[in-house]
Amino acid sequence: MQNNFKDKVILVTGAGNGIGRAIAMLLGAQGARVVVNDLGSSGSGEGSDAGPAQKVVDEIRAAGGKAVANTDSVATAESAQAIVDTAIREFGRIDGVINNAGILRDRIFHKMSTAEWQAVLDVHLNGAYFVSRAAAPYFKEQQGGTYVHMTSTTGLVGNFGQANYAAAKLGIVALSKSIALDMARFNVRSNCIAPFAWSRLIGTLPSETEAEKKRLERMQAMKPEQVAPVAAFLSGDDSADVNGQVLAVRGNELIVMSQPRPVASVHRAEGWTLETLAEHAVPAVKRAFTPLERSPEVFSWDPI
């Protein structure tokens, strides 16, 4: 295994706390030069504070690493460009982007407001696009670069009260695959991680029922530091054969998530009518339908 990170410049968004912080700390320890981006907002995206990003930078530097703080928002093209510009100004290049910044504004669908919908898409989906797009010309020019995007089983599988978050996180998977396809010719890779770990955002989820309490207990057993090595690995040279994938990290488990592919088909030479769809098509393919499940039902075992 070679030294993946000496002189590499990696940008981590939302790196002031939780998973982002753990990733930034590990990259700094591995010799990367780290741009620690964090707006310093609340879990719902309100306010700002330069403290969290600078504190992580101070910790990386105290351990002998190199890092710089940035507090711009990911949610606009201009501020995302400013984040990438920080890497270029301070370190002269950019080699990797880890799109980790996120907020939650959970609400049951029929009560969700337009503002709650838009705010979450702006940070997660638009933020991933804006930061990735700002770095793309540099990756193309230098014929290399890596993207790691945080998705969620809320989008991949499903969950209650998170239509905005689910839509954004599943959109990120499609964005990542498109980047991987479009930029593979430039030796640029793009992958997703669906992390299971206790974080500030997870701490805002409801815990009223026994099932919800048990779910949060499971989440508390899974640490951001268990996600960080996978994100760092995907940003290094040893993962050259990994592109366009979705990996779930659950405690010490590494899980390859499926991506949509045909699973069953049926045809009639004369085409379909409403009657034959009901009498023939649905009974023939119903066995292949995906159950209406939530993430806790699919990942029902205790984390390893």
Image: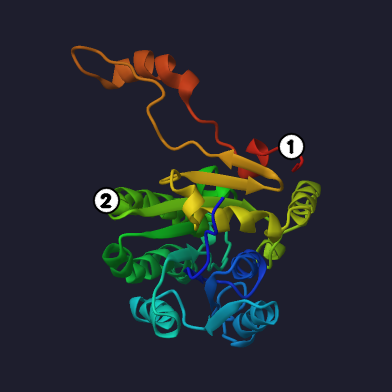
Task: Decide which of 5, 122 is in the foreground and name it.
Answer: 5
Task: Decide which of 72, 47 is in the foreground and name it.
Answer: 72
> Residue 160: where, in percent of width, then height?
60, 50
> Residue 57: where, in percent of width, then height?
62, 81
Question: Closer to the camera: disc 1 or disc 2?
Answer: 2
Give the residue type at disc 2: Arg
Residue linked to disc 2: 185
Identify the element where label 1 is drawn.
loop
Residue linked to disc 1: 301
Distance between the alpha carbons at the discs numbered 1 and 2? 40 Å
Coloring scheme used = rainbow
Question: In terms of image quadrants, where is residue 256?
Answer: top right
State the residue lying farthest toward the front.
2
37 vs 18: above or below: below
| Neighbour tally class for label 2: few under 14, some 14-19, many 20 plus, Cα within 10 Å | few
> Residue 261: where, in percent of width, then height?
39, 31
Give the residue type at disc 1: Trp
262 vs 240: above or below: above
Identify the element where label 2 is drawn.
helix
The label on residue 241 is none
Whether residue 121 can be seen here: no
> Residue 282: where, in percent of width, then height?
40, 20
Name the residue located 36 percent from the left edge and 78 percent from the top edge. 81
Question: In terms of image quadrants, where is residue 93?
Answer: bottom left
Q: Earlier in the sequence, mark 1 or mark 2?
A: 2
Name the residue located 71 percent from the left edge and 48 percent from the top edge. 251
